[in-house]
Image (spheres, helix red, strand yellow):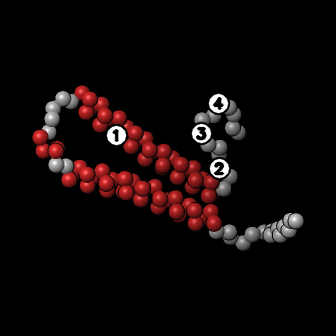
Amino acid sequence: MTTWSCMNLQDSASPIMEQLIFFHDHTLMIVTMILVSVLYFMTSMTINKNVNRYMLEGQTIELIWTIAPAVILVFITTPSLRLLYLMDEIHNPTMTIKTIGH
């Protein structure tokens, strides 16, 4: 049962909701790793006063920060699309309701 002090998601009642909770945890872990790495790079850049003379032409670093977000997005979208298609499937409904409104 959820209370005001509970910081987690509710217990799942279906397998799809359990997969959604796993996806939430997966995405939160990716965001946490990005945040920690950015904070580490920012603090190391402020503490380190050395200058790299080869950094003026940085094709490799530009290639890395162009490809890295694409790879991260692939790691996020593949489970997301799988869950999206799992949520769309309906296996043998027990009751169908047709509503007509005016």
- Residue 5, which numbered label? 4
Q: CA distance from mark 3 to mark 2?
A: 11 Å
x%, y% of residue 74?
Answer: 41, 59
Q: Quadrant of residue 66?
A: bottom left
Q: CA distance from mark 2 to mark 1?
A: 32 Å
Does 50 sit above or below residue 87? above
Q: Is residue 92 left or right of residue 68?
A: right
Q: CA distance from mark 4 to mark 2?
A: 18 Å
- Residue type at mark 2? Ser
Q: Is residue 39 left or right of residue 25?
A: left
Q: Nearer the viewer, residue 77 or 96?
A: 77
Q: Secondary structure at mark 1?
A: helix
Q: CA distance from mark 1 to mark 4?
A: 30 Å
- Residue type at mark 3? Asn
x%, y% of residue 86?
Answer: 59, 64
Dot 2 alpha-carbon crowd within 10 angstroms: few under 14, some 14 to 19, many 20 or more:
few
> Which one is in front in this view, the residue at disc 3 or the one at disc 1?
1
The residue identified by callout 3 is 8
The residue identified by callout 1 is 37
